Every structure is written in C-alpha cells, then in structure tokens.
Image: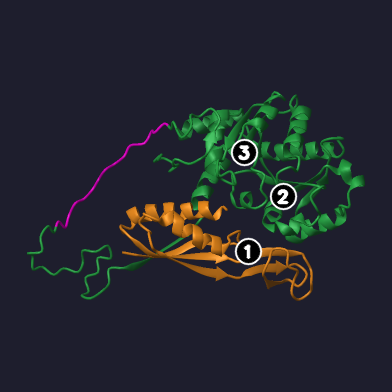
C-alpha cells in the first residue's frame, strides 16, 4: 500500500501505469519514534495498576473502553484529494468540467465534437473513466487532443485520488480546459468531488423526462444540464418542458442547454458556455506571478 | 454500490485514528447520515461487515444517527422539513427550496478500547 496517499491494491488501472503498481516518489522521511514503556512480562508483580489501558483511567473499576469524538466526514479523504486537485487547477488557471450521465447518453460523441470544434482555439485535455477498455480514450485521441483512460475495474465512479494520478500523467499546460468523462452512472459520481469547477449532466431525450427526479442527487450536484440528441425529438414523446421543470425541482439554479452533437444544433451555446467558464477561471491568472509564487513556496 | 468504498473510507479513518488516539480495537462506530445524503443505510450496514472483517473493527457495531432533511423555502422565507430532494414546500407547494441540512455523511464518535 502506498503510504503517501494510502492507495491500495485495487482494481483501478490508469493507462501508462503498470497494473497494480504505483510509482510514487516518496520525498518524505519516516520517523519511527516508538516509546516502549510498561513492559509487564509476568503476573508476579503485585502492582495493581488500572491505568495501563488506552484510556489511562486511574480510577479503580473504570472500564478501559472509551468514546472518541472524531466528527470526520466519511468522504473526508476523497475531499482532501479533491482540494489538492482544485488547488492545482487554480494554480494553472485551468477550467475542469466533470461530465456525468447514464451510459449511452452520447457523452463521448458530444465530447469529440466539442474537441474538434475548439481544438484550434483552446488547449484541452481529457480524462476518460470507464469500467473497462480504453476505447473512449482512443476515440478522443483521434481528435488530436491528449487523453488518458482510467479503468475503475469494479468501481462505479471516479474518485479524486485516481484523477490526481491521471493529471500527473497528462501534465496539462497552463489554462487547459480539462474534461473528465466520468463513469456512465447517475448515482455514485454525484457524491465524489473530483476538484472540478462544475459538474455537467448530460441527458439524452431518448431517456425519459423524469430522469432528474429519478436520480435527484446527480441533477442536484450539476450546474449545467445538456439535453442531448434533440435532433431525435420529432420521433419521440419526450416532454422537454416537463424535464426542465423536474430538473429545476431538484436544483432551482441549474442551467439548461438543448443540444445535438449530431446535427450541431445548440452546440454554439455550449461552446460559448465553455469559453465564458474558462475565462472566469483565468481572471487573475498570470503565469509569471504564479511561477514566482511557486518558487517562493518551494 | 459506492457504500462499499465509503466503508473503506471509514476503515481508513479508523486506522489513522487508532494511531493518533492509541486504541487497538473499535467496538462501536456512530455515523451521522442525513436523509438527503446519497447513502443507502441497508447497503452501508452490509458493506461495513464485509469491509471490517479481520481488521481492528472486526465485529464492531455500526450505529446510524439519521438527521432530517431541511430546506429554506424562498416563498415562505422559512426553514421547512423535506424527505427528498424534489419535495415541494409542505406549506406553500413551491419547489424554490434551498437544501440547508440533511446532507451529512459523518463519522461522529467511536467506542474504542
């Protein structure tokens, strides 16, 4: 087990890393200060001391069990990694978007269209999360944008720790827009912060308008909802207004864009949303001062 | 399904705490779980037993304290109780609610020895 971050022998594989092997640099030292006191080897001692337990209770008859108040967030560990990722993104003036949806909503196609349209305009990179195969990362790389695949194995979501490792491999340049395509799952990825600026939920109109209230956690966590495949609307009974109303029930502040990555309809709005979000991340970002600050803190 | 990874997270916290607070065994773990959090309590209890087997928390009891979901109703300008994220305001029926509580997923306290 890696003692820096505690990552164990899991099922997760990050492309470019040998299976089950994490090559971390360990720049820290391990202090082994063990104090060995209270060696009671035999019972011949007549010293009835009640203070040897962890509670150090000296009152006779007091139980050695005790209550420890810890008040820690169960996701605390993940949130720590997410915080580190977020700091890294801020220091590089990066916009990071976490794309979440059910399988088959057209995430990857939407992403490849987006990359093709914007690659000459902005620096971009992609982290692909899937249970198995690197098919999606290969589809992304065909657009010329760097991509790395994380296979979660038995996992149903990406966590901040996996993403942190993937970023090291990608080593994106300053002001990159990073897309994280999460595992197709509308439940678990909602709870795991990856350090992203926004979660973007993608819902295709072939799915049914009540998805936002069937999977409320995800639509509550997302800042933007992309209603995808709207070119198919004439063939479906999808109630667009109802869907948007449901989404606003679980998240009154959610922004909704109607798009079709196939026909291109509405895609300009999505691109404009990316541009504006990216600019807001770049406000106050100055590579010169950033590198000076890094030198100072180093 | 992510209850399993959450339980692994709990175990990591227990192992870390056992070093700083010097205890060897965990007897009870008390969790505070909000009604609106994404945790299924039944699945949590099941995964907990599996994950803690042969660890310092083997055979320990999992106590779950539920906290109620609360939200601020923009129309009524007051706090109301809700059971689900998409519940309407019980008083005025509006969906303009901002969740204020009940999203907790916390390890509150441990009984250790």
Residue A75 seen by the camera? no
Q: Are marks 3 and 2 in contact (CB under 8 Å)?
A: no
Residue A223 bears which disc, if any?
2
> Marks 3 and 1, Cα distance to the nearest angstrom?
26 Å
Quadrant the N terminus of chain A occupies: top left
Q: Is residue A215 left or right of residue B23?
A: right
Label 2, residues with CA under 10 Å away: few <14, some 14-19, many ≥20: some
Q: Is residue B86 left or right of residue B25?
A: right
Magenta stretch: give its range: A25-39
Which chain identifier belongs to the orange chain?
Answer: B
Which residue corresponds to the image point at 65% horizontal and 33% vertical from the top-left? A126
**Residue A167 visible, this orientation:** yes
Q: Position of residue A42 (x, y in %)?
A: 10, 60
Q: CA distance from mark 3 to mark 2?
A: 20 Å
Q: Are marks 3 and 2 on the same chain?
A: yes
Q: Residue A145 at what x, y percent from top left?
A: 68, 26
Chain of the residue under the numbered disc 2 shown in the image: A
For disc 3, the marked residue is A129
Quarter of the view holding residue A57: bottom left
Left or right: residue A3 compared with residue A77: left
Instruction: Say which colour chain A has.
Output: green
Q: Nearer the viewer's eye, disc 3 or disc 1?
A: 3
| Rendered residue at 45%/59% (across/down) | B49
Observer-nearest of A260 and A47 = A260
Residue A33 lies within the magenta run? yes
Quarter holding the C terminus of chain A? Answer: top left
Asked whether residue A213 is drawn in magenta, I would say: no
Q: Which residue is mark 1?
A: B36
């Amino acid at each position: 087990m890696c003692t820096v971050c505690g990552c164990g022998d899991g099922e997760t594989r990050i492309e470019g890393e040998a299976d089950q092997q994490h090559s971390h640099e360990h720049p820290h030292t391990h202090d082994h200060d063990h104090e060995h006191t209270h060696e009671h080897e035999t019972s011949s001692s007549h010293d009835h001391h009640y203070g040897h337990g962890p509670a150090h209770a000296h009152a006779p008859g007091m139980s050695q069990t005790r209550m420890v108040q810890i008040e820690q967030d169960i996701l605390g560990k993940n949130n720590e990694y997410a915080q580190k990722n977020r700091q890294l993104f801020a220091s590089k003036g990066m916009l990071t978007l976490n794309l979440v949806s059910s399988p088959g909503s057209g995430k990857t196609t939407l992403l490849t269209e987006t990359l093709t349209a914007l690659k000459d305009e902005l620096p971009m990179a992609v982290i692909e999360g899937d249970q198995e195969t690197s098919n999606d990362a290969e589809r992304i790389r065909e657009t010329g944008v760097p991509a790395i695949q994380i296979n979660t194995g038995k996992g149903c979501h990406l966590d901040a720790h996996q993403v942190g490792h993937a970023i090291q491999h990608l080593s994106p340049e300053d002001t990159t827009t990073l897309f994280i395509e999460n595992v197709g799952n509308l439940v678990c990825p909602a709870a795991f912060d990856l350090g992203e600026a926004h979660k973007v939920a993608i819902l295709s109109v072939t799915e049914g308008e009540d998805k936002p209230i069937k999977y409320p956690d995800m639509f509550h966590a997302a800042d933007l909802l992309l209603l995808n495949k709207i070119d198919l609307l004439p063939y479906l009974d999808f109630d667009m207004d109802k869907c948007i109303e449901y989404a606003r029930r679980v998240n009154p502040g959610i922004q909704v864009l109607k798009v079709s990555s196939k026909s291109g309809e509405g895609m300009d709005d999505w691109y404009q949303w990316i541009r504006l979000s990216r600019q807001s991340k770049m406000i106050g970002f100055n590579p010169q001062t950033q590198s000076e600050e890094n030198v100072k803190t180093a | 399904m992510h209850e399993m990874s959450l339980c692994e997270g709990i175990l990591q916290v227990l192992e870390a705490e056992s070093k700083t607070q010097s205890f060897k065994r965990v007897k009870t773990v008390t969790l505070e779980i909000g009604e609106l959090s994404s945790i299924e309590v039944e699945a949590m209890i099941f995964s907990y037993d599996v994950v803690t087997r042969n660890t310092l928390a083997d055979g320990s009891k999992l106590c779950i304290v539920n906290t109620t979901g609360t939200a601020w109703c923009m129309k009524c300008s007051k706090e109301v109780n809700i059971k689900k994220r998409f519940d309407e305001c019980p008083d005025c029926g509006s969906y303009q609610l901002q969740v204020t509580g009940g999203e907790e997923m916390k390890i509150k306290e441990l009984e250790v020895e």
